[in-house]
Amino acid sequence: MYHDLHFAFNFPLFVGSPAVDDADLRKNDVVRIYDIFLGYTDCLCATDKILRQILIQPEFQKEMGTAEFYYHLGKYAAEWEEKTGNKDVSVLAAAYRCGVPVHTSSPGDSTIGMNIAGLEIKGLKLRINPSIDVNETTSYVLYAKRSGGESGVLLIGGGSPKNFMLQTEPQIQEILMLRDVGQDYFIQITDARPDTGGLSGATPHEAVSWGKVDPTRLPDAIVCYLDVTVALPLLTHYALARHKPRPLRRLYDRRPELLERLKKEFFRHTRI
Amino acid sequence: MYHDLHFAFNFPLFVGSPAVDDADLRKNDVVRIYDIFLGYTDCLCATDKILRQILIQPEFQKEMGTAEFYYHLGKYAAEWEEKTGNKDVSVLAAAYRCGVPVHTSSPGDSTIGMNIAGLEIKGLKLRINPSIDVNETTSYVLYAKRSGGESGVLLIGGGSPKNFMLQTEPQIQEILMLRDVGQDYFIQITDARPDTGGLSGATPHEAVSWGKVDPTRLPDAIVCYLDVTVALPLLTHYALARHKPRPLRRLYDRRPELLERLKKEFFRHTRI
Amino acid sequence: MYHDLHFAFNFPLFVGSPAVDDADLRKNDVVRIYDIFLGYTDCLCATDKILRQILIQPEFQKEMGTAEFYYHLGKYAAEWEEKTGNKDVSVLAAAYRCGVPVHTSSPGDSTIGMNIAGLEIKGLKLRINPSIDVNETTSYVLYAKRSGGESGVLLIGGGSPKNFMLQTEPQIQEILMLRDVGQDYFIQITDARPDTGGLSGATPHEAVSWGKVDPTRLPDAIVCYLDVTVALPLLTHYALARHKPRPLRRLYDRRPELLERLKKEFFRHTRI
Amino acid sequence: MYHDLHFAFNFPLFVGSPAVDDADLRKNDVVRIYDIFLGYTDCLCATDKILRQILIQPEFQKEMGTAEFYYHLGKYAAEWEEKTGNKDVSVLAAAYRCGVPVHTSSPGDSTIGMNIAGLEIKGLKLRINPSIDVNETTSYVLYAKRSGGESGVLLIGGGSPKNFMLQTEPQIQEILMLRDVGQDYFIQITDARPDTGGLSGATPHEAVSWGKVDPTRLPDAIVCYLDVTVALPLLTHYALARHKPRPLRRLYDRRPELLERLKKEFFRHTRI
């Protein structure tokens, strides 16, 4: 999400190479992400400067989850896109415009989290509360199930974001103790294998034992061992070629309602 | 950290196999982590029940970072170890006894985060603030550098925890704008390669361009492509064989002092 | 090449799954290649039976390289395709029809090599001579260079076949001591990384140090870390979409001439 | 086997780095194998020169399998070790002294195969016949089984050598049609996963369906996803620590006898 801001703010990133002398890059004020080059001063620090101006605006001065945080940030990203005439380059701006909630499981890890922490020393009132993310993401899945629909996960990569998405079902069943049977669809694109025992490589089969995936839907569950830069364009092209655009769900706007539904069902079964 | 509690609370985990029918496991109340089996009711839910009793204790009813959170939790883990006579099985208990701070970059991702979120619906006052973790971890590195010592990172695996540990140097240089030159030592044990462009596979060379690693120390930086269950016993055995035990640093106890030093240096350069 | 014969002979292969009980498969006369099932008796042994009838035909009773061997075998594969009406299913048949030479670096490794070895016990006169393959493949590259053209390698996977294709340049320069500068193009699709030190992961950069790849063409050399079942359809579709079919080179037919040219240039520089 | 000769002939290899400019290496007469440097003229071409002197000796001027070939070559390697006082550095020399047969599945692929092919142009009489390797390796396994013992495979890496070792059981059962039940032990150290469908990653489970591994021994079969430079010293140290040296079997010397046994059993069941 941080590096998405370079696009929104119209700062340049360059095609580079991993086979370079990184001490040289450092001396020349260039930062590398594998084969992408960006300026330390011109891009990183310039992005930070604008970001800090945004973070001290009034709408950020309170406790919130990351969905609300990224929505506010996405509004600025969308404005910057308009201002610079550089449209449709920012994921945060697109998510803002479409009402798609964006969550992160590790809010302190990234230059956004670093800037928030830096400003907190100077008195920033913003507090990211991870529990809000846990309960909101769970409420989306519960609603999909309770409203007669189906739920699915499309996992790009692995690590903490993967489990964060999948733990919504155990949150429903194991923690809130509500009746459910797991996700209906599971598609993962990864290069991680299960044998290391890590989260990134855990299979939909393993997820079934946790109640994360409906065992009856296992034959449709897919792990695709593929570079995501190849898989995502293929999937996207396929989706656009096969389906007409559908009306937006604007799930972001419905967060208060869906969380309320979750709490209501929870309290029906639980005493305070 | 969550699964560490099974050991502390003396709940059994079993050696299993990844080549099983997971729908069968689910039916039989068994949960699988690759080749480890644990009981859904007997282990998972039983752990949750004790955990929730702990989380509602008075010391948890406030805002804190994860180091403080795990310290309080570690105290209970240590007590359970004593009570069950099952000593030296819990990492959290050991960290508590030794004053080693434990941080996580994704506090909402895990069954601990899920239980906190569930209890928050019922009024729990605990708030995990990720910014506290960002600033505390940064203060450790800054202190190591300012007190004439050296700093290093030992990275087991990758993902968000890896960057969380490495971003301490950019937090010092890029965000707090204090003078520094990067980590002195970098050892990583991983199976992730750099070519996917992900965090887990990013090399110490790449980290140099970000100021995360001191370029003059690059020849000593190591990426070891190895299963950690092989690497860690070898490293541990080597360390124990070559060095006598050293007095504990008890870094946990010094957190307030180290954070104060960071703030003091920050404010020397910055106006509020 | 052996499993290609099942298609030519019109024996069925089935879509299976890797998550099965292989002892059960064995009991039920089914053989597995990852997620492909084939009958032990109906497919494997039936293929062997026809193959042995072919191998005892007169044209096989002599010393030859694998290009000639597969050409003769391809003629039978093409006849079987015609006979069963099951056209364009066999790679060997297609190579035969187009005059594309097919070489293998490990002629004894595969059920074809096993059947040859079995028949040798009974007096088969066929002898595969690997040196013929080494010199023929080298002659193709030398001819491409000497006739004003360019040469390139498209490597699918790694292992011994990869080096066998790349060693043609050292054969020219280091062994035959003829002047040359390495391949002009290098495209590899693999999942092997260089850090293990194995052949499969060796990069075009490493190949440059051996004279296998022209150093001035290195910027165009590509290693693509991708599953070949995704990469090959994309490459094939791209090639068919961008270029009209070209007249066949029928390199197979020109083998004697190209080997003669190699020997002539060699003897110009070398005394017997 | 080729690079083993540098050690036998006492030519130097150097610890280098994969992060170098390979065009520079090429200009400076240095050849790279991942992080090993060797001189093009001083090591490669110097090794070739001695190798060619050996290959024209009388004992090589006939048809043979690779076991016999490497035995003859190992004799020279052992003599060079003596001569240069540089003992116990060559694998070929050790195998020669201990009577351990060495086979390769791809005799034309390597600088040894290249030198043989180059000399063949000048009239060398040596012919490597891969069928001899297929039948000799099969005879070892059959003898182990028929003499009341057990057989096992220790697979370091994958590719063609892996299958060449494993195909001995199908050679017994499927091709020679003799009764058998597969290998008793299967240990593999690899970094290749099964999901790509390649040979290197094929599991012992898959091998069971082919009759390559005895299904009743599957629980003992091991695939260890580990860098072999870590695994092999651990295994070797373990073996040396747990077992006293055993008398050598000198399997090389028994090849004619074992092949005769295989043929005898074959002809008992088969008409010519």
Image (cartoon, coloured by chain):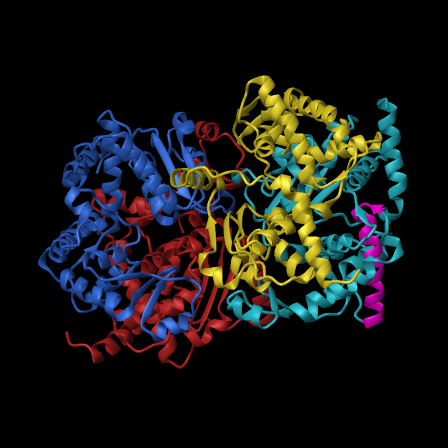
Chain colours: A blue, B red, C yellow, D cyan
The quarter holding residue D167 reads top right
Magenta-colored stretch includes residue B245 = no
Question: Residue visible at 34% across and 77% down?
Answer: B180
Query: Can you see residue A66?
Result: no
Judge by depth and name the residue closer to the eye, A139 or B77. A139
* D265 over D29 or under it: above or below: above
Which span of residues is magenta-colored? D63-85
Residue A9, x across and y down, in percent: 18, 59
Residue D186, x across and y down, in percent: 68, 41
Question: Residue visible at 38% across and 80% down?
Answer: B147
Query: Can you see residue D81?
Result: yes
Judge by depth and name the residue closer to the eye, D74 or B269. D74
Q: How many marks?
A: 0
Residue A168, x across and y down, in percent: 31, 39
Residue B29, x across and y down, in percent: 44, 31
Residue farthest toward the left in the current orientation of the protein: A58
The quarter holding residue B75 reads bottom left
* A74 over B202 or under it: above or below: above
**Predominant SS along the magenta part:** helix
Residue A38 shown left or right of residue D32 in the figure: left
Quarter of the image containing the C terminus of chain A?
top left
Residue A63 shown left or right of residue C171 in the figure: left
* D229 over D189 or under it: above or below: below
